[in-house]
Image (cartoon, helix red, strand yellow):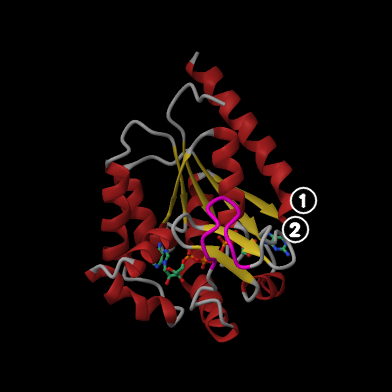
Amino acid sequence: MVLQRIFRAVIMGPPGSGKGTVSARITKTFGLSHISSGDILRSNINNKTELGLLMKCCIDQGQLVPDDVMSRLILRDLRAMDHSSWLLDGFPRTVPQAEALDDAHSVDTVINLNVPFQTIKQRLTSRWTHLPTGRVYNVDFNPPKVPGLDDETGEPLVQRDDDTPHTVTLRLKAYENQTEPVLEYYRSNGVLETFTGTETNMIWPHVEAFLHKKLFSVKQKVA
Ligand SMILES: Nc1nc2c(ncn2[C@@H]2O[C@H](COP(=O)(O)OP(=O)(O)O)[C@@H](O)[C@H]2O)c(=O)[nH]1
Ligand SMILES: Nc1ncnc2c1ncn2[C@@H]1O[C@H](COP(=O)(O)OP(=O)(O)O)[C@@H](O)[C@H]1O
């Protein structure tokens, strides 16, 4: 689908709620560019950049990276995409980050995946990731065609260092304390749309229908 105007969206939800999985479907269906804060951080860690080396221990301990570091990193990438439609995944995660984003760009819609914590815990310990692209697999839900290898490149998949049961518990706490207030921030701005469920395949048709409607009404307003 070719969009008629620039459209900017954020996808939110606790760790493991399916943000990466749903983002891949959104980008494929609607042609938005996908920017994942976690993928950017992991690529820095993998390439052993100064930032990656500094932030690795924060991430492995289930803590958030400091706001100023994160906002600078993401806003710099967004500046290079001035004329693109995008979908931000994993940013903002705190109210100061949401304010920094608002100062630079207006957000058309925020998709919130509301998935129970119990469902998430089981998923994360069986998540396998292709680090260079951020493609995710799951032993039960979407296993790779060949165990341990990425479907498209044949390269090895890894289990993230922060997907251990202990670190997942810490990440969920950080989500409750620091990220849930962002939902309130966007709710009061009138852009929050929440999708509740335990299965991505049940949630996705609703997200897809919502975005179709949203993009259609945006186009009509412009016309
Ligand atoms: N069992 C199951 N696993 C899922 C479902 N949706 C996504 N997953 C898997 O759950 C894990 C977390 O999903 P991901 O998209 O990475 O979530 P994120 O952390 O919010 O970006 C991955 O291993 C996915 O393959 C689902 O509906 N059921
Ligand atoms: N916007 C952000 N602010 C602070 N830390 C972040 C941000 N995005 C990602 N991180 C760090 O990277 C880790 C992994 O993030 P992400 O890949 O989005 O994973 P998930 O959604 O599965 O928790 C987070 O636990 C956190 O340490």
Q: Which residues are magenta?
A: 148-157
- How far across and how far down the image is residue 10, in percent? 49, 48
| Magenta run includes residue 214 | no
Structural crowding at the residue carrying mark 1, measured as other residues with C-alpha within 10 Å and reported as few (<14), some (14–19) or many (≥20): few
- How far across and how far down the image is residue 25, in percent? 61, 44
Q: Amino acid at mark 2?
A: Glu
For the image, the number of numbered tags is 2
Q: Is mark 2 within 8 Å of ligand 1?
A: yes
- How far across and how far down the image is residue 155, in percent? 51, 60
Q: Are marks 2 and 1 in contact (CB under 8 Å)?
A: yes
Residue bearing mark 2: 199
Question: Which labelled disc corresponds to residue 202?
Answer: 1
Local SS, label 2: loop
Instruction: Give me the residue at 70% from left, 46% from top.
Output: 204
Instruction: Give me the residue at 66% from left, 72% from top.
Output: 117
- How far across and how far down the image is residue 216, in percent? 60, 24
Q: Amino acid at mark 1?
A: Met
* Position of residue 156 in the picture relative to residue 58 (left or right): right
Considering every residue shown, the one lying at the far bottom of the view is: 166
Q: Splitting the image into 4 quarters, where does residue 84 fall?
A: top left
In what quadrant does ligand 1 lie? bottom right
Q: Is mark 1 within 8 Å of ligand 1?
A: yes
